[in-house]
Amino acid sequence: MTKPIEDSLEKIPIINWLVKLGKKIKIPGLQGMSLYDIIEMYIIGIVKGALTSRAGGIAFSFFMALFPFILFILTLIPYVPIEGFQDDFLVMIEQLLPPNTAETVHEVINDIANTKYSGLLSFGFIASIFLMTNGVNAILGGFEYSYHVTEMRNILRQYFISMGMSILLAITLIVTVAIIVYFEIGIENLKSKGWLKDDLFWIEKGQFLFFVILVFVSVSFLYKYGTKEVKHYSFFTPGSILTTLLTILMFKLFAIYVLKFATYNELYGSIGTLLILMLFVWLNSIILLLGFELNASISRLRRFHYYKEENL
């Protein structure tokens, strides 16, 4: 793709062989683009796109929106007429949070989730809608400041799109928890009939599967409608697959880091919980942008090949 970069790589032993191999590997469905073209464009987007700075902006806005959103959802839980919904939602929240943070806020979360606070519900609804919209708007803004994106939406249109997307993502979360509840009921019924022996195994695997689906669908939704320029014919993209895999890996590694190596609570006391959570959100923001950059790189290569064929 870029002649100066290719000339520099050809002078490096082993790397020049990998470049030649990458050029021979054609990606199906991408108009004959090679693996090397995608990797080169992807790395250029990461290096020149100020990835960590954009992730910092997203993490701050998302962190500000996180607590009002959780507060609103938790105050809404007692009004949901599904048996076992409260307990399963609390389990999912604790699974999404880093290990030490979940234990710290468990009593507060449990109290709000099992007690009806009508005044808190109205306040939480207004605050959560506003801050959730800001959080999603920051994500879309981070997408638009990609090196590969040149066309942006106007401010008002972007804000209303962010509001609609934040509401849909909240609904997706609630629906996922409801499905998990009915899934567990079904597993228990199968065990009572003697068709299953270890219901806990299937419940744990089912919860993990639904969590993966939740992340995959949510990320795909953000990538599909996040920007005006980067569009794909398919709802599920290579970027959403990459982000989902990296998210699962990050959850596992970050849990090990918090339990084995992190000493935030010893150094900072209770505020260490917030530091862990901030780091956790920032890492997720980087992963989200990494997946988007892959989609943006493929989209730009498609446009390049399209204009190249038009001019021939």
Image (cartoon, rainbow, N blue to C red):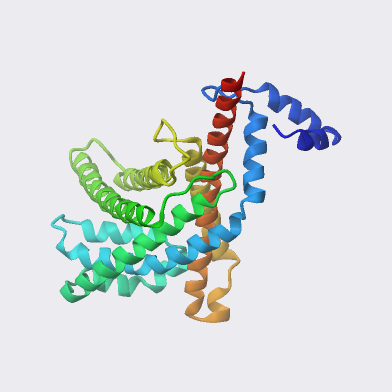
* Residue 11 falls left or right of residue 73: right
Please say if 54 is above or below 188: below
Q: Nearer the viewer, residue 161 or 169?
A: 161
| Percent coordinates x, y for residue 102 in the rendering | 40, 67
Q: Residue at x 26, y 66 (%)?
A: 72
Is residue 212 among what the camera can see? no
* Residue 107 falls left or right of residue 228: left
Image quadrant in which the N terminus is located: top right
* Residue 103 falls left or right of residue 242: left
| Percent coordinates x, y for residue 110 in the rendering | 28, 70
Is residue 243 among what the camera can see? yes
Please say if 239 is above or below 17: below
Q: Residue at x 60, y 22 (%)?
A: 311
Q: Nearer the viewer, residue 93 or 256?
A: 93
Q: Nearer the viewer, residue 260 or 163?
A: 163
Disc count in the image?
A: 0
* Residue 310 falls left or right of residue 76: right
Give the residue furthest to the left: 81
Q: Nearer the viewer, residue 47 or 241?
A: 47
| Percent coordinates x, y for residue 231 in the rendering | 44, 37
| Percent coordinates x, y for residue 225 in the rendering | 39, 43
Q: Residue at x 66, y 44 (%)?
A: 44
Image quadrant in which the C terminus is located: top right
Give the residue furthest to the top: 312
